[in-house]
């Protein structure tokens, strides 16, 4: 087990290095940031002096080496727009993004798992058809359209919830629903299929023949054994929630990393974009590691050599 964790931690380092390298290459190909940072009538002397102050006059390989060396020390440079440390700007907005992603994931699990179980227990009945139809609809609706509809109905017409901002639980409700609906629908469909498969298993029939209560059979046996693929999807969906938060944060003016990075990309603020890519890559790699380790507690048959 310990050897497995050590190997996975090394793999996390490789993933983070790959993401950092990809971010560096793509941003180098995106164009010259001086075109946005300086006036169009700036003289060549001013442009060259500014380029040298940013280290952009060095060969690309030298820039890459300096970038990796500084990144290992947690230094991604200074934002080209705000003149503040890039990593600090990203980490400053990370709590808001994690709060939104965590709330969206909690909403998805609370709605998706019970819906999937209900659909499995009522197979072939109108209730299953209704639940699965809603799940299909939830996976078909774009996040931006759902967000706008929530703002229109609950914010502008009913006036019961705020449509933008950050600071209270009410501000979180609409972005949470918009962000978590797709994941809730995916979890519901996967839970339904997993529970149906487990209910047909021999051990479930044996438990029922011994007089086990129906609810205990479903939740203590069938749902627990169907949880491994669900947990896998939950771990993977965290990445989807964080990436989807770019749209959600923009629609609801949520002060998270996604909206901040979107602005940084449009401004070609290289250090901020690179710092955010590395932070997200490390976060998702560790989440996947935690998901893998959680299999041990869900299924004692799982062993890592």
Image (cartoon, helix red, strand yellow):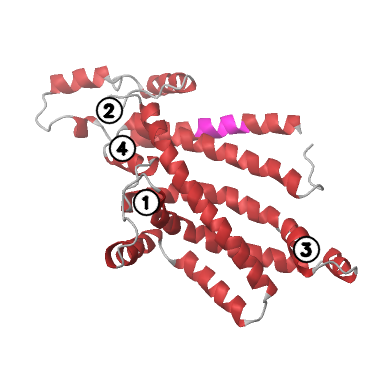
Relative side of 107 to 118, left or right: left
Q: Nearer the viewer, mark 2 or mark 1?
A: 1
Q: Nearer the viewer, mark 4 or mark 1?
A: 1
Which image quarter holds the N terminus? Answer: top right
Given residues 250 and 45, the one toward you in this image is 250
Disc 1 or 3, which lies upstream in sequence? Answer: 1
Let me know if residue 248 is in the magenta part.
Answer: no
Of the numbered discs 3 and 2, the one sitting upstream in the chain is: 2
- The answer to which of marks 2 and 4 sits earlier in the sequence is 2
Nearer-the-camera pick, 135 or 151? 151
Residue 256 seen in this snapshot: yes
**Where residue 242 sits in the image (x, y, percent)?**
46, 46
Q: Residues within 10 Å of mark 3 (few under 14, many from 20)?
A: few
Alpha carbon of mark 2 to alpha carbon of mark 4: how far? Answer: 9 Å
Image quadrant of residue 167?
Answer: top left
Residue occupied by mark 4: 264
Q: Which residue position holds label 1?
A: 171
Q: Which residue is mark 2?
A: 80
User: Is 187 on the left-hand or right-hand side of 7?
Assistant: left
Instruction: Tell me the SS state at disc 3.
Output: helix
Residue tagged by mark 3?
216
Q: Are marks 1 and 3 in contact (CB under 8 Å)?
A: no
Q: Main secondary structure of the magenta part?
A: helix
Magenta segment: 11-18
């Amino acid at each position: 087990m310990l050897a497995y964790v050590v190997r996975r931690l090394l793999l996390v380092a490789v993933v983070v290095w790959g993401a950092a390298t990809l971010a560096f290459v793509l941003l180098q190909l995106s164009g010259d940031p001086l075109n946005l940072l300086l006036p169009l009538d700036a003289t060549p002397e001013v442009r060259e002096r500014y380029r040298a102050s940013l280290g952009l006059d060095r060969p690309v390989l030298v820039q890459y080496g300096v970038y990796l060396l500084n990144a290992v020390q947690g230094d991604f440079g200074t934002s080209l727009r705000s003149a503040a440390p890039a990593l600090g700007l990203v980490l400053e907005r990370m709590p808001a993004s994690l709060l939104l992603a965590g709330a969206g994931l909690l909403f998805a699990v609370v709605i998706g798992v019970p819906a999937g179980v209900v659909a499995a227990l009522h197979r072939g009945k109108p209730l299953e058809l209704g639940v699965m139809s809603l799940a299909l609809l939830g996976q078909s609706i774009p996040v931006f359209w759902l967000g706008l509809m929530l703002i229109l109905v609950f914010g502008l017409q009913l006036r019961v919830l705020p449509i933008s901002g950050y600071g209270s639980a009410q501000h979180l409700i609409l972005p949470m629903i918009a962000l978590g609906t797709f994941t809730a629908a995916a979890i519901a469909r996967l839970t339904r299929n997993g529970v149906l498969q487990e209910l047909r298993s021999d051990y479930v029939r044996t438990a029922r023949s011994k007089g086990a209560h129906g609810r205990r059979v479903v939740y203590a046996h069938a749902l627990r054994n169907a949880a491994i693929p669900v947990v896998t999807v939950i771990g993977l969906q965290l990445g989807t929630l964080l990436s989807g938060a770019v749209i959600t944060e923009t629609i609801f003016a949520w002060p998270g990393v996604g909206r901040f990075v979107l602005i940084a990309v449009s401004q070609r603020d290289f250090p901020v974009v690179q710092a955010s890519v590395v932070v997200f890559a490390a976060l998702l790699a560790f989440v996947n590691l935690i998901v893998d380790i959680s299999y041990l507690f869900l299924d004692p048959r799982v062993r890592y050599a």
